Amino acid sequence: MKRDTQLMRAGRPHHGTRPVNVPVDRASTILAGTARELYNRPDGTPLYGRFGTESQNALRSALCEMQRADYCALTPSGLSAMTLTAIAEVSAGGHVLASDSLYGPTRMFLTDTVARWGVEVEFYDPRAGAGISTQIKANTQLVLCESPGSLTFEVQDIPAISKAAARTGARIMVDDTWSAGLNANMLDLGADYAAQSLTKYVGGHSDVIMGAVLAQGEAAKRLKQAEWRMGLYVSPDDAFLALRGLRTLELRMEKSARNSLEIARRLADHPAVASIIHPARDDHPDHALYLRDFTAPAGVFSVEFAGWDIARSERFLDALGIFGLGFSWGGFESLAVHCDPQLRRHFRTAHDGALIRLAIGLENVEDLWNDLEQAISASA
Ligand SMILES: *Cc1c(COP(=O)(O)O)cnc(C)c1O
């Protein structure tokens, strides 16, 4: 079966009289038919609502099928998907390496919380590739990667990092939100954990907060145990919405990506622009890695405007009419934010000017372009 067919079929039954979609199945208590069944449920029947009902299991199995994973933990947010992998892998006396391009709140979990457990937290240059081996120690337990990185979109050489980590038995987690698990398979590239914010493209409609972590083999067992021990839970209503989002994921990502590349192309020719940071463009420094590991891009990228300060960026954002000002991306609607990627980083990025991150939605590309063009002029 081809991938688009698979996306329409994953996570739902194909035989018998039934609704097309797995219904929202709300439960805390799930009654047993007999005393024996209290602890020994018939195959596939959940024991208790916290472990999920048919609604959560349908989403889990669809995501596992997409990425050929053995287990999918569903988490109350994308952030908790990232933090769950640290809980599954890290212990006192250990060492954790994290990409300098990691999503800000994930970094803060490491430096504020994991560090308190007696774990050494260190950052590495997202472009280190195989060079990361100089920072991997005998007690390195987990390497947290994100590809491409938040705000600055460095693509990481996951196979090289995975090989370097394997030499001492360190596990690697990749924040895979940009590919949505659709346009790349981080597990195939060597990640032990592929984690993503389903809030972004999978949810796709700016009305669900959720995350997922996928793993195979032994890592899948540790992941499931950590999820259960933590008591993590997502509602069946939200699982239903995320699974609904999955059906149109490819279509939405395609248009969002096409729109973004067209907007990026026009911005690149605009005199106000210093550079475009979009991994699917051949002027991106990691374009070759992108071509090797991804089949298509997401529609979010950053723009560096020539000599803009924060005040100019703010005037630009305030002049936008169609773009909303807000965090997140992967929804149907276009969004813009300004960001200073230098703020919390250890390694210098190549960008000194103010960056604007654009999340391109499903609107008509001419309307989006006109909005950006008028806002650049109006902010002068
Ligand atoms: C948004 C985002 C997260 C966090 O996801 P939430 O669902 O908002 O908690 C993590 N990583 C990346 C790369 C993100 O863009």
Image: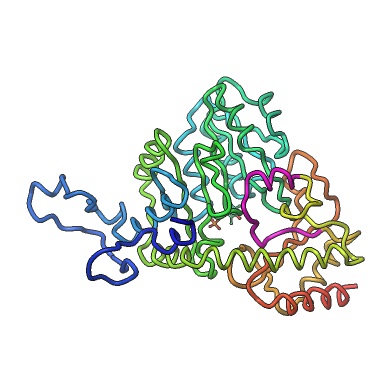
Q: Is residue 353 above or below residue 375?
A: above
Q: Determine the quadrant in which ligand 1 lies.
A: bottom right
Q: Residue at x 42, y 39 (%)?
A: 216
Q: Position of residue 276 (x, y in %)?
A: 80, 57
Magenta-drawn stretch contains 174 = no
Name which quarter of the figure residue 127 lies in: top right
Q: Is residue 281 above or below residue 40?
A: below
Q: Residue at x 68, y 61 (%)?
A: 300
249, 89: nearer the viewer: 249
What is the span of residues highlighted in magenta in the rendered image? 286-303
Q: Residue at x 80, y 68 (%)?
A: 314
- Quarter in which the C terminus is drawn: bottom right
- In the displayed orientation, state which residue is furthest to the front: 1
Q: Position of residue 176 (x, y in %)?
A: 57, 49
- In the displayed orientation, state which residue is furthest to the top: 138
- Quarter in which the N terminus is drawn: bottom left
On the rendered structure, is 340 left or right of 330? right
State how the image is colored: rainbow
Count how many numbered circles sit on residues in the image.
0
Q: Is residue 334 above or below residue 283?
A: below
On the rendered structure, is 236 left or right of 32? right
113, 222: nearer the viewer: 222
Q: Residue at x 14, y 49 (%)?
A: 38
Name which quarter of the figure residue 362 lies in: bottom right
Magenta-drawn stretch contains 302 = yes
On the rendered structure, is 168 left or right of 286? left
Q: Position of residue 353 (x, y in %)?
A: 85, 55
Q: Position of residue 62 (x, y in %)?
A: 40, 56
On the rendered structure, is 72 left or right of 291? left
